[in-house]
Amino acid sequence: MDKSKIYIATFSEHAAETAAKYGVNLELNDTCISMRLDPEHMDVTLRSMEKELTKAGSRNAIVHGPFTEIIPSAIDHRAVEFGLQRLQEAYEATAAMGLNRMVVHTGYIPLMYHKSWHLEKSIEFWNRFMEGKPADFQLYIENVFDDEPLMMKDLIDGLDDPRVRMCLDVGHAHVVTVPEYDVYQWIEVLGRRIGHFHLHNNDGTADTHQSMEDGTLDMVRVLAAIKEHCDDDVTFTIESRKSEENVIWMLEH
């Protein structure tokens, strides 16, 4: 596998050291918690990101944006505006680092919002966020509590923006998907709409971010489905809590 396509989430132990050792890259988690984007914290956040990139020896990186209280389908318009503000701050941090790719969560909250409402409001939300962003900026919208792939399919199709693709987190899908679908069918349904993957395993009951072979997902089958249904330019972030053994696994498979 092309090493330029492999990333390690920085919450994974020794992520930067492992990236340097094996010539892979980082997905920076520094802005996941939105308070780190406050003006009084931003300098520290940017210095932390710079330190990680320097240690990894590569500036081929992706930024994971904030996921706390980002709710595109919120009924209260102030909540929507707050989410857009936080994401804009994360974009500005990304641009300040000379980077142009960002992962964000869908913000779907099951039982709270009807899927049709969430889809309609999400299309409005992400269209607003992408206004004025440069042509080379890439946004990856990641599933979390989304329990089937069709809403994500309709979201990407509804946005119809080449700058916006999906990040399929296979571990999340494995935990929450309805019986009618499995992770391999998610990949088949979403296909070329997927631009990035988060890879980790679990037993199907909790989002534990285990290693590739430590769970009930057949990760070899996952990679085979990706090869069959997705474009060749897809990239992969290892989101297991251990970094080195999973980079070795990826390079071998």
Image (cartoon, rainbow, N blue to C red):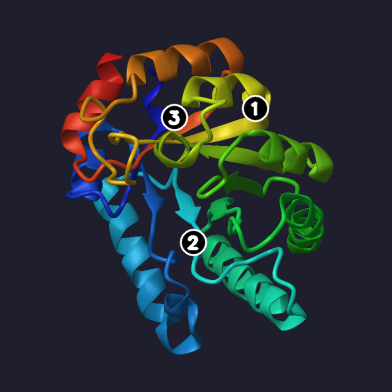
Numbered tag placed on residue 140 in the rendering = none
Q: Which residue, given by chain and number where applicable, does mark 2 sit on? A: 97
Task: Mark 3: give few (<14), some (14-19) or many (20+) Cα within 10 Å.
Answer: some
Residue 165 pos. (x, y %): 66, 39
> With respect to residue 111, does 244 lie above or below?
above
Q: Is residue 27 left or right of residue 186?
A: left
Name the residue: 55% across, 40% down: 167
Return the disc, 1 or 3, that comes first in the chain's sequence: 3
Q: Nearer the viewer, mark 2 or mark 1?
A: 1
Q: Which residue, given by chain and number where applicable, does mark 3 sit on? A: 5
Disc 3 and disc 2: Cα gap in Å? Answer: 19 Å
Residue 160 seen by the camera: no
Task: Mark 2: give few (<14), some (14-19) or many (20+) Cα within 10 Å.
Answer: some
Disc 1 and disc 3: Cα gap in Å? Answer: 19 Å
Quarter of the image with the C terminus is: top left
In depth, the one of 130 and 178 nearer the eye is 178
> With respect to residue 226, does 164 lie above or below?
below
Return the disc, 2 or 1, that comes first in the chain's sequence: 2
> With respect to residue 159, does 249 lie above or below?
above
> Amino acid type of disc 2?
Met
Return the disc, 3 or 2, that comes first in the chain's sequence: 3
Q: Is residue 200 left or right of residue 92?
A: left
> Amino acid type of disc 3?
Lys
Residue 214 seen by the camera: yes
- Disc 2 on helix, strand or loop? loop
Q: Is residue 67 left or right of residue 248?
A: right
Q: Which residue, given by chain and number where applicable, does mark 1 sit on? A: 190
Task: Mark 1: give few (<14), some (14-19) or many (20+) Cα within 10 Å.
Answer: some
- Disc 1 on helix, strand or loop? helix
